[in-house]
């Protein structure tokens, strides 16, 4: 019962912070939901199914022996051999440490949400049930957590872009006086005048 009161208080604080953030940024909740509209996606170039690896990429930490990963899938699209986009789904029976990290400490700075958004193409096992759940979501809808405190079941999904190569650096040209084949300069360094 005490945990439920704590989670309720945490959810109210997070709700207030989320509403304030939306009002500050001038975005209405409907505009936030519109950002996550789903379009038909091409098939992923690579699908990762290793539960521990997907957990680590989703939560930026390794699972403990108390975290029971039920399902995990990460899809990646590549461009020129580099990950250009990714999408992740995971379902875990969360350890108290993971619950504290993600829900109580709110490691990813998520705000409360009335209901989860179901991404198009989600795996069949990712059927979010918001009944009695704490639902937290990033402002752009790029990450969301659905946590059921009584069963400790946590579902999370996220999406994002990959790291892309930057523009090449412009070629550096040396002044003519420095463009020699020797490492030793052609003239000695200046000497300070003696007094």
Image (cartoon, rainbow, N blue to C red):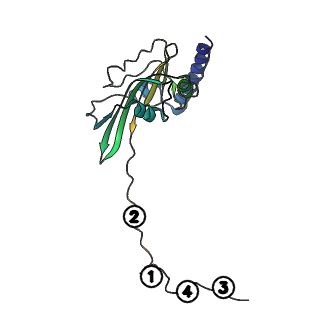
Q: Is residue 39 above or below residue 9?
A: below
**Mark 4 — residue?**
188
- The span from disc 4 to disc 1 (Cα, nearest Å) is 14 Å
Depth check: 177 or 63 in front? 63
Q: Residues within 10 Å of mark 4 (few under 14, many from 20)?
A: few
Give the label, 3 or 2, closer to the camera: 3
Dot placed on the residue nearer the N-terminal end, 4 or 1:
1
Position of residue 189 measured from the top left corner of the image (x, y, whole percent): 57, 84
| Mark 1–mark 2 CB contact (< 8 Å) | no
The secondary element bearing badge 4 is classed as loop
Separation of residues labelled 3 and 4 (CA atoms):
12 Å
Numbered circle sitting on residue 68: none
The first of marks 1 and 2 along the sequence is 2
3D distance between C-alphas at marks 3 and 1? 25 Å
Question: Rounded to the nearest whole Å, what is the CA distance between mark 2 and mark 4?
Answer: 31 Å
Tell me: 119 left or right of 17: left
Could you tell me residue 186's position as x and y percent?
49, 86
Quarter of the image where the N terminus is located: top right
Q: Write down the residue under mark 3.
A: 192
Name the residue located 52 percent from the left edge and 13 percent from the top edge: 150
Q: Which residue is mark 2?
A: 170
Residue wearing tag 1: 182
Callout 4 touching callout 1 (CB < 8 Å) = no
The C terminus is located in which quarter? bottom right
């Amino acid at each position: 019962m005490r945990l439920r009161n704590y989670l309720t208080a945490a959810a109210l604080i997070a709700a207030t912070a989320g509403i304030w953030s939306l009002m500050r940024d001038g975005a209405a909740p409907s505009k936030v939901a519109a950002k996550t509209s789903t379009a038909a996606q091409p098939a992923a170039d690579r699908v990762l199914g290793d539960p521990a690896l997907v957990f680590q990429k989703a939560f930026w930490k390794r699972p403990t022996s108390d975290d029971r990963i039920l399902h995990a899938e990460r899809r990646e699209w590549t461009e020129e051999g580099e990950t250009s986009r990714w999408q992740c789904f995971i379902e875990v029976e969360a350890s108290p440490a993971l619950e504290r990290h993600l829900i109580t400490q709110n490691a990813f700075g998520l705000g409360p949400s009335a209901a989860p958004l179901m991404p198009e193409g989600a795996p069949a096992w990712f059927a979010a049930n918001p009944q009695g759940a704490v639902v937290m979501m990033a402002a752009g809808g790029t990450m969301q957590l659905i946590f059921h405190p009584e069963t400790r079941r946590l579902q999370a999904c996220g999406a994002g872009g990959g790291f892309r190569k930057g523009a090449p650096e412009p070629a550096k040209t040396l002044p003519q006086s420095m463009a020699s084949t020797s490492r030793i300069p052609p003239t000695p360094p200046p000497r300070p005048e003696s007094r």
